[in-house]
Amino acid sequence: MAWNSLSQADLDGKKVLARFDFNVPLDGTTITDTTRIDSCLETIQHFLKSGAKKVVLMSHLGRPKGKVNQAYSLEPVATYLAEKLNEEVTLTESCTDSGIKTLLGLPNTKIILLQNLRFHANEEANSDEFAKALSSYGDIYVNDAFGTCHRKHASTHAVVKFFKANDCFVGPLIEAEVSALNNVLESPKKPFVAILGGAKVTDKIKIIKRLLPQVDQMLIGGAMAYPFLAAKGLEVGNSMCNQEDVTLAKMILNGSGKEKIRLPLDHVTAPALDGEATACGNQEISEGQIALDIGEKTVREYSQLISSAKTILWNGPMGLFENEKFAKGTFSLAQAIAENTDCFSLVGGGDSVSAINKSGLASKISHISTGGGASLEFIEEGSLPGINALKFGVN
């Protein structure tokens, strides 16, 4: 069953209840990265241009753990939205404030932003009662918060129960995310190269199992590479490595598709995270050293494989890229992806997105997923609870 696209919705004279992802980083009350809000502005403007009577926006911010915490107030978001939209944005005291119904009846109040959903424990509890209260603010429901679709929360899941199927719509950001992910997962052009980094094998085991039958090459770097090297009987010094990860790595290296896995040939090491960087020219890492980046031989091999790929999925950096001494591997692979103009490239996961943005090469990537955990779970499972709710409804 297909979902209802927002482009098909008749908004004229309707109250629109829309779930967005305004979970932006704050320094006090200053938003330090407005990307998530900026990506929603065009859709909000579409509501207004299409004759919506009222636009009720909802989002979470941070992790206030079901209690009111003014450090996570959406007030900075309301201020920024008002400035960018050149419209008054009214922030409510809470999501269930009795004054909301009054606001909905006022002729001049166009845009209402509900205060942080997660100030209420019932949001994360996927409460029917809370979802019903939210649903009473809109004639139609729009979900364009891909980054929260992996959670069964009231504003992304239970709320669908209280709208007719024809009154629930998917927004353009979710459509773009799902289209890009399906492009990689369902019909990738070959050769298909996956680049996996980050911390733990346990965190990525489902992704490895899902992708290994499909990819032509799987390039592993970052801290998750060292359990694989240890599983092959190589010394890894003081690099991040625990027995559970080594056991999983052995299982993968003894399974089908093992010939597709590429591991670092050399490293950049240091005695501590803030220590001096040293080139380590072979796979084994000296006692007392921590591997914190892939070395030059690895960069050359991985870059060559990337250059011939037609589909690239990148999740997780190749090292401690936040420190410039250990950033070369990650940024070199970013450059290799950017230079391959004959491929579809998808970058997903918080650290990978941060790295590609920091490299200045984001414009050269086909699709950068803003979903974080949601994009990873989509790769693992093939769909998400919030998306299934839009497609099939909620009982």
Image (spheres, rainbow, N blue to C red):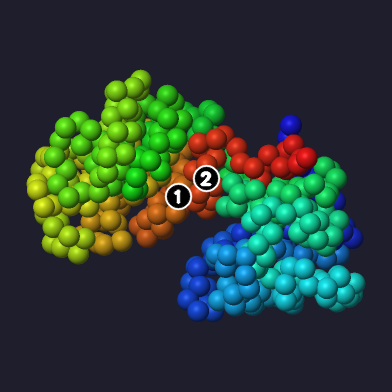
Kindly identify the residue that appears in the image at 89 percent across and 60 percent down: 13
Q: Residues within 10 Å of mark 1 (few under 14, many from 20)?
A: many
C-alpha distance separating marks 2 and 1: 7 Å
Tell me the tag on residue 349: 1
Question: Residue 210: x and y, percent?
Answer: 46, 30
Kindly identify the residue that appears in the image at 17 percent across and 50 percent down: 238
Local SS, label 2: helix
- Let me know if residue 52 appears in the view: no
Question: Residue 140: x and y, percent?
Answer: 82, 53
> Where is residue 196, by image quadrant?
top left
Question: Residue 393: x and y, percent?
Answer: 76, 40
Viewer-proximal residue, 334 or 274? 274
Kindly identify the residue that appears in the image at 37 percent across and 26 percent down: 216
- Let me know if residue 210 appears in the view: yes
Q: Which residue is mark 2?
A: 375
Q: Is residue 164 left or right of residue 358?
A: right
Answer above or below: position of 383 versus 61. Answer: above
Local SS, label 1: loop
